[in-house]
Amino acid sequence: MSEIPAAAQPPPEFEHYAGERLRQALTADPRVSDLSLQVHIVASNVFVTGQVPTQERLDAVFDVALEVLPDHVLHNDVSVISLSEVASEEHIS
């Protein structure tokens, strides 16, 4: 497997800032509005993980990520969880 030359790799701080920019966009964009999504960037790969309540928000995660980081490969590992599933698992004492 060949490695990417050091000069061609983005500096480590780029990954941090790009990830933070996407996190802020996912929080601020009304199509998503989710504080709990996690973003990790490795080279040109963007990994978004977490859970959203609807398929529309899941689709919006993909859209927003592509708008913010169009030159990256998106790995959308976000899943849709129904609110009834959450409510049935909650135990209050």
Image (cartoon, rainbow, N blue to C red):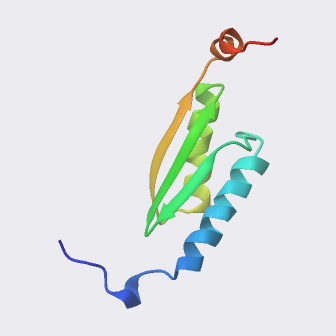
Pick the quarter of the image with the C terminus. Answer: top right
The outermost residue toward the right is 93
**Is residue 2 positioned above or below 40 on the image?**
below
Residue lying at 59% horizontally and 78% vertically, measured from the top left: 13
The residue closer to the viewer here, 18 or 60, is: 18
**Is residue 13 positioned above or below 51 on the image?**
below
The residue closer to the viewer here, 54 or 14, is: 14
**Is residue 17 positioned above or below 83 on the image?**
below
The outermost residue toward the front is 93
The outermost residue toward the left is 1
Q: Position of residue 3 (x, y in %)?
A: 26, 78
The outermost residue toward the bottom is 7
Q: Position of residue 41 (x, y in %)?
A: 51, 62
**Is residue 63 positioned above or below 93 on the image?**
below
Residue lying at 74% horizontally and 44% vertically, measured from the top left: 35
The residue closer to the viewer here, 52 or 65, is: 52
State the image quarter where residue 19 is shown: bottom right
On the rendered structure, is 55 left or right of 42? right
Q: Position of residue 9 (x, y in %)?
A: 42, 81
Q: How many marks?
A: 0
Q: Position of residue 72 (x, y in %)?
A: 46, 63
State the image quarter where residue 54 is shown: top right
On the rendered structure, is 49 left or right of 21? left
Pick the quarter of the image with the N terminus. Answer: bottom left
Residue lying at 65% horizontally and 58% vertically, measured from the top left: 22
